[in-house]
Image (cartoon, rainbow, N blue to C red):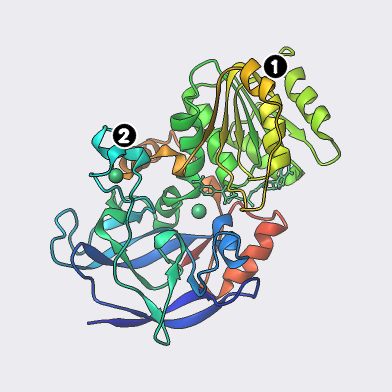
Amino acid sequence: MPHEVSGVVARTKGDPVSVEKIHIPDPGPGEVVVDVQACGVCHTDLHYREGAINDEFPFLLGHEAAGIISQTGADVTNLTEGDFVILNWRAVCGQCRSCLRGKPQYCFSTHNAQQKMTLDGQDLSPALGIGAFAEKTLVAAGQATKVSDEVEPEVAGLIGCGVMAGLGAALNTGGVTRGDSVAVWGCGGVGDAAIEGARIAGAHTIIAIDLDERKLAWAKDFGATHTINSSDMDTPQVIEAVQGLTGGNGVDVAIEAIGLPSTYEQAFYSRDLAGTVVLVGVPSPEMRIDLPLIEVFGRGGALKSSWYGDCLPTRDFPMLIDLYLQGRLQLDRFVSEKIGIDEVENAFHKMERGEVLRSVVIM
Ligand SMILES: NC(=O)c1ccc[n+]([C@@H]2O[C@H](COP(=O)([O-])OP(=O)(O)OC[C@H]3O[C@@H](n4cnc5c(N)ncnc54)[C@H](O)[C@@H]3O)[C@@H](O)[C@H]2O)c1
Ligand SMILES: [Zn+2]
Ligand SMILES: [Zn+2]
């Protein structure tokens, strides 16, 4: 039976989001309906509502979620009703040229549910193909990964986006390993997860860079060994500060977790020779960078971007839950507050003011 449930919708660019009654169809072949239990507020939701991702309004926001499978469509073999799942926004296809070459984490043809959720008969665009600031959501079966239900949903859901993106930026994309030096630009949920990843990997020096002292204090709790408040610094000063903390050399892995040309440039010049730059922050379409090609060549190493931390949900989500249950991964620290479904707009403002790492909507 189809459902009418409450969901958080961004109707037009820049306008405050609102809670609306939305329509969830029964799952078709390969689809499941999830009773969402918790969904974190990620900066990408705000990017959607600002029109910075695309203009396919109205958006059903929310994409960092955990919940219970309540209905399965035909041909769904990996899940059954009652399974506790974390949702992901890169369900791999198994058939594209990347999957076939054994690199499903880069799948070039990830998929979402075929059917549409709707608002007053109009198709909704679910954020990152999920749309989980809602009591129920419809996703492709490959977008739901079963994990241990010993974990609270507000904690498990975080792995579905920001935490995975940051951890993976360090562990998978950046390949941080024991003894490395790492710097992270932007200490929001994503940046702090990158710091946590660098700590778990055994990085020797972990430098957190942000404009906000409170964010830097939290970054230290996650394992930053040094902090740089760059609010009164220009780009050369930031580079000098990073070099000053690394014997004049720069870091092995420089992770940009904001999505700005200025901080990307800082990361580019703050890395050691043969170092790696990882861009995990999402830029908006009009942004440009201008780098001397001789510097790109002369510094060697790698300039990489990190889609979802280059994760493979079936491999990484249960593993991270295990690390959490063993007390080796600090996930609770990311949950700044639990809020109701009608408080998402307010949570965006708190995010902009730097008051939270993650506000998590509890359904
Ligand atoms: N690549 C991916 O798969 C992926 C996944 C999730 C989120 N993201 C992106 O990661 C980015 C961060 O997300 P978040 O949820 O952590 O956001 P956030 O807003 O919580 O954190 C951003 C942090 O950057 C700091 N900051 C802003 N401008 C700065 C500057 N000029 N110099 C230094 N610090 C600065 C802010 O003070 C804040 O602490 C966003 O662009 C988001 O869209 C990417
Ligand atoms: Zn594929
Ligand atoms: Zn996100």
**Observer-nearest residue: 245 or 285?**
285
The residue sitting at 50% across, 28% down in the picture is 174
Reply above or below: 99 against 182.
below
The residue sitting at 29% across, 51% down in the picture is 145
First in residue order: circle 1 vs circle 2: 2
Where residue 112 sits: x, y (%)?
33, 60
Which of the numbered marks, if any, corresponds to residue 103?
Answer: 2
Circles 1 and 2: CB atoms closer than 8 Å: no
Q: Quadrant of residue 195?
A: top right
Label 1 residue SS: loop
View extreme (right): residue: 232
- Name the side, left or right, on which 162 lies relative to 74: right
Instruction: Look at the numbered disc 2 and say if its residue's Cβ is closer than 8 Å to ligand 2.
Output: no
Q: Can residue 272 be seen from the camera position used here?
A: yes
Which of the numbered marks, if any, corresponds to residue 246?
Answer: 1
- Name the side, left or right, on which 237 lies relative to 310: right
Reply above or below: 129 against 60.
above
Q: Quadrant of residue 308?
A: top left
- Name the side, left or right, on which 160 lies relative to 191: left
Label 2 residue SS: loop
Q: Can residue 42 be seen from the camera position used here?
A: no
Which quadrant of the render holds ligand 2?
top left
Where residue 37 sits: x, y (%)?
39, 65
Amino acid type indicated by mark 2 = Lys
**Observer-nearest residue: 113 or 190?**
113
Where residue 328 sits: x, y (%)?
43, 33
Where residue 234 sits: x, y (%)?
84, 35
The residue sitting at 35% across, 39% down in the picture is 105
View extreme (front): residue: 293
The residue sitting at 29% across, 71% down in the picture is 115
Amino acid type indicated by mark 1 = Thr
Decide: few, some or many residues near mark 2? Use Cα within 10 Å; few <14, some 14-19, many ≥20.
some
